[in-house]
Amino acid sequence: MSYPTDRRYTKEHEWITPDGTIGITHHAQEALGDIVFVDLPKVGTEITAGKTLGTVESVKAVSDIYAPVSGTVTSVNGELATAPEKVNKDAHGAWMLKITVKNPAEMNALLSSADYEKFVSEEAGH
Protein backbone atom coordinates (compact mmCIF):
# COMPACT_ATOMS: atom_id res chain seq x y z
CA MET A 1 0.00 0.00 0.00
CA SER A 2 1.29 3.41 -0.93
CA TYR A 3 0.23 6.21 1.42
CA PRO A 4 -0.44 9.73 0.07
CA THR A 5 2.56 12.03 0.53
CA ASP A 6 0.43 15.17 0.99
CA ARG A 7 -0.34 14.38 4.63
CA ARG A 8 1.22 13.34 7.93
CA TYR A 9 0.45 10.17 9.90
CA THR A 10 0.24 9.03 13.52
CA LYS A 11 1.33 5.73 15.02
CA GLU A 12 -2.34 5.30 15.99
CA HIS A 13 -3.19 5.23 12.24
CA GLU A 14 -4.78 8.63 11.67
CA TRP A 15 -3.80 11.04 8.90
CA ILE A 16 -3.99 14.82 8.63
CA THR A 17 -3.46 17.16 5.70
CA PRO A 18 -1.76 20.56 6.04
CA ASP A 19 -5.21 22.23 5.94
CA GLY A 20 -6.41 20.25 9.00
CA THR A 21 -8.45 17.49 7.33
CA ILE A 22 -8.34 14.28 9.42
CA GLY A 23 -9.16 10.63 8.67
CA ILE A 24 -7.96 7.12 9.42
CA THR A 25 -5.49 5.22 7.27
CA HIS A 26 -6.08 2.36 4.88
CA HIS A 27 -4.17 0.15 7.32
CA ALA A 28 -6.58 1.09 10.13
CA GLN A 29 -9.73 0.40 8.13
CA GLU A 30 -8.27 -2.90 6.92
CA ALA A 31 -7.52 -3.96 10.51
CA LEU A 32 -11.01 -2.92 11.65
CA GLY A 33 -12.96 -4.72 8.94
CA ASP A 34 -16.42 -3.54 7.90
CA ILE A 35 -17.08 -0.17 9.53
CA VAL A 36 -20.67 0.20 10.73
CA PHE A 37 -20.60 3.45 12.74
CA VAL A 38 -18.45 6.55 13.13
CA ASP A 39 -18.82 8.81 16.19
CA LEU A 40 -17.27 12.25 15.66
CA PRO A 41 -17.16 15.47 17.71
CA LYS A 42 -19.44 18.42 16.98
CA VAL A 43 -18.30 21.56 15.16
CA GLY A 44 -16.69 23.93 17.65
CA THR A 45 -15.21 21.15 19.80
CA GLU A 46 -11.61 21.71 20.93
CA ILE A 47 -9.45 18.63 20.34
CA THR A 48 -6.05 17.97 21.88
CA ALA A 49 -3.15 16.18 20.21
CA GLY A 50 -2.95 12.56 21.34
CA LYS A 51 -6.38 12.56 22.99
CA THR A 52 -9.45 10.65 21.79
CA LEU A 53 -11.66 12.69 19.45
CA GLY A 54 -14.18 10.00 18.48
CA THR A 55 -14.65 6.32 17.70
CA VAL A 56 -14.99 3.99 14.75
CA GLU A 57 -17.13 0.90 15.21
CA SER A 58 -16.70 -2.14 13.02
CA VAL A 59 -18.22 -5.59 13.04
CA LYS A 60 -15.10 -6.65 15.01
CA ALA A 61 -14.54 -3.89 17.57
CA VAL A 62 -14.83 -0.26 18.61
CA SER A 63 -11.63 1.75 18.19
CA ASP A 64 -10.74 5.22 19.36
CA ILE A 65 -9.72 7.92 16.90
CA TYR A 66 -6.93 10.11 18.27
CA ALA A 67 -6.29 13.75 17.41
CA PRO A 68 -3.06 14.05 15.41
CA VAL A 69 -2.71 17.70 16.48
CA SER A 70 -4.63 20.19 18.63
CA GLY A 71 -7.29 22.46 17.17
CA THR A 72 -10.95 23.37 16.82
CA VAL A 73 -13.39 21.28 14.77
CA THR A 74 -14.71 23.36 11.84
CA SER A 75 -16.48 20.65 9.83
CA VAL A 76 -17.60 17.02 10.19
CA ASN A 77 -18.22 14.64 7.28
CA GLY A 78 -21.97 14.10 7.68
CA GLU A 79 -22.01 11.43 4.95
CA LEU A 80 -20.35 9.02 7.37
CA ALA A 81 -23.41 9.08 9.65
CA THR A 82 -25.44 7.21 7.04
CA ALA A 83 -22.62 5.65 4.98
CA PRO A 84 -19.74 4.72 7.33
CA GLU A 85 -18.62 2.10 4.79
CA LYS A 86 -17.16 4.95 2.70
CA VAL A 87 -14.13 4.71 5.00
CA ASN A 88 -13.63 1.07 3.94
CA LYS A 89 -13.97 1.97 0.25
CA ASP A 90 -11.52 4.90 0.32
CA ALA A 91 -9.86 5.53 3.68
CA HIS A 92 -7.67 8.31 2.30
CA GLY A 93 -10.56 10.02 0.50
CA ALA A 94 -13.28 9.64 3.14
CA TRP A 95 -12.22 12.39 5.52
CA MET A 96 -13.82 12.45 8.96
CA LEU A 97 -13.43 16.02 10.19
CA LYS A 98 -11.66 19.27 9.54
CA ILE A 99 -10.02 21.44 12.16
CA THR A 100 -8.33 24.79 12.50
CA VAL A 101 -4.86 23.69 13.59
CA LYS A 102 -3.85 25.48 16.79
CA ASN A 103 -0.09 24.92 16.51
CA PRO A 104 1.17 23.96 13.01
CA ALA A 105 4.54 22.94 14.53
CA GLU A 106 2.78 19.86 16.02
CA MET A 107 2.66 18.48 12.47
CA ASN A 108 6.46 18.15 12.55
CA ALA A 109 6.17 15.41 15.19
CA LEU A 110 4.02 13.25 12.89
CA LEU A 111 5.24 10.63 10.43
CA SER A 112 5.80 11.22 6.72
CA SER A 113 4.17 8.72 4.35
CA ALA A 114 7.50 6.84 3.96
CA ASP A 115 8.01 6.72 7.73
CA TYR A 116 4.41 5.56 8.24
CA GLU A 117 4.77 2.78 5.63
CA LYS A 118 7.95 1.63 7.38
CA PHE A 119 6.18 1.74 10.78
CA VAL A 120 3.23 -0.32 9.49
CA SER A 121 5.49 -2.94 7.93
CA GLU A 122 7.56 -3.21 11.14
CA GLU A 123 4.40 -3.40 13.25
CA ALA A 124 3.16 -6.25 11.06
CA GLY A 125 6.46 -8.05 11.62
CA HIS A 126 7.54 -8.08 7.98
Image: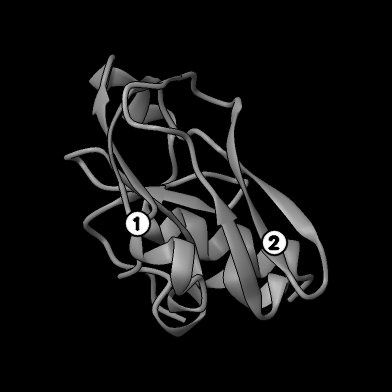
Front residue of 97/24: it is: 97
| Mark 1 lies on residue | 78
Residue 42, horizontal then vertical, whole percent: 41, 33
Q: Which mark is residue 26?
A: none
Q: Where 114 falls versus 76 (above or below)?
A: below
Residue 20: image quadrant is: top left
Q: Residues within 10 Å of mark 2 (few under 14, many from 20)?
A: some
Identified at 34% across, 56% down, the residue is: 78
Residue 107: image quadrant is: top left
Residue sitting farthest toward the left: 19
Q: CA distance from mark 1 to mark 2?
A: 16 Å
Identified at 73% across, 76% down, the residue is: 126
Q: Earlier in the sequence, mark 1 or mark 2?
A: 2
Identified at 28% across, 15% down, the residue is: 103
* Residues at circles 1 and 2 in contact by the CB criterion of under 8 Å: no
Residue 51, horizontal then vertical, whole percent: 60, 25
| Mark 2 lies on residue | 57
| Amino acid type, callout 1 | Gly
Number of numbered discs: 2
Front residue of 11/76: it is: 76
| Amino acid type, callout 2 | Glu
Q: Where 59 falls versus 12 (above or below)?
A: below
In the shown orientation, is residue 43 left or right of residue 91? left
In the shown orientation, is residue 109 left or right of residue 39? left
Secondary-structure class at tag 2: strand
Identified at 26% across, 24% down, the residue is: 101
Front residue of 93/42: it is: 42
Residue 36, horizontal then vertical, whole percent: 64, 72
Residue sitting farthest toward the front: 82
Residue 104: image quadrant is: top left
